[in-house]
Amino acid sequence: MLHRSQRHLAHGPCGPAPYFFCRGRFSRLFKGRLRIHSCGPLPLALGIALDTYVAIAQALESNLAATSVAGTTAIVLTLLWYAYPVWRRINPGTSQPTSEAFNSMQQSLAGDLALAAVRVLGLAKKRNLTIVTAESCTAGMLSTLLSEAPGASEHLHGGFVTYTKENKTKVLGVSEHLLTEKSAVCTEVTIAMAEGALRRSPADLAVAVTGVAGPEPDEDGNPVGRACIAVARRGYEPSYLARNYGDIGRDAVRRRAVADALSELIRMADKD
């Protein structure tokens, strides 16, 4: 039991609060459950210091020692409250630079993709070619990127998005047997997608992308980051690529696949 005077001193700075409330406030602070902005740094520090005072006064039966320790606690906590944000600005750690570097890398990659799309449409104009896309894991990202480049209205017919095996068969004519035997992520299926898109459109060039963007492997066990790309051009043998980007994140896998698809499209469009 507390002495009557100690009970009086145990009232908190934000209003009457018994000793157990102050101690509860202290414990909740470190569990992240206290809305500390509601009282401010000084009242909070005084509340914790008051809790310290009562505990020491009980243990040592010395009001002088308890007052000294409690006062020091209040001062130190208040100084730490204001010093910590300054320290964080001086020593931000690795999170902020990493985030900035990542954002910069993403912006740079997006710019590179846009430039590659412009180059593709420029070659299409030069060679008088038209393009169609057939996409799975990129889900229309490639056709969207091409549609934003100058000349898209004259040289881009559009695109097919065939996410499932059933739709690959229904829309592009990919063999069910091939999909069952080889899985949806293989060079044979990607070539079949590109050739199917070419047969079903008036385009001269068809580019196809299939893969596993994540976050989990696909139903056939293909790992996250695996992608296959194919480009079919009328009068030429189709070209294809197989890539393993690794588990670098869903968006990063798709961007890498689009970048490689654009590069292969440029190579095939530039053929004589």
Image: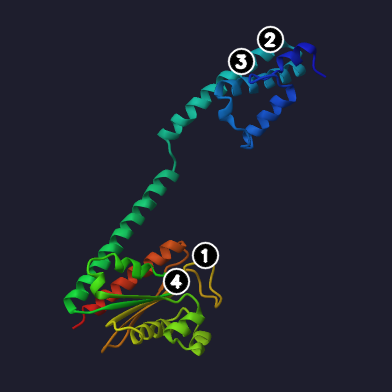
Q: CA distance from mark 3 to mark 2?
A: 11 Å
Q: Who is closer to the viewer here, 18 or 225?
A: 18
Which of discs 1 and 4 lies nearer the camera? The answer is 4
Mark 4, secondary structure of its residue: loop
Label 4 belongs to which residue? 137
Q: Position of residue 109 (x, y in %)?
A: 32, 59
Q: Are marks 3 and 4 in contact (CB under 8 Å)?
A: no
Sequence order check, earlier mark of 4 and 2: 2
187 relative to 11 in the view: left or right: left
User: How far across and down, in percent of the image, does residue 105 sit?
Assistant: 35, 55
Alpha carbon separation for disc pair 3 and 4: 63 Å
Residue position marked by numbered label 2 in the rendering: 64
Separation of residues labelled 1 and 4 (CA atoms): 12 Å
Q: Which mark is residue 71?
A: 3
Q: Evaluate if marks 3 and 1 touch, with contact meaning CB atoms under 8 Å apart.
A: no
Count up the numbered dots.
4
Neighbourhood count class around disc 3 (C-alpha, 10 Å): few under 14, some 14–19, many 20 upward: some
Q: Residue furthest right?
A: 1
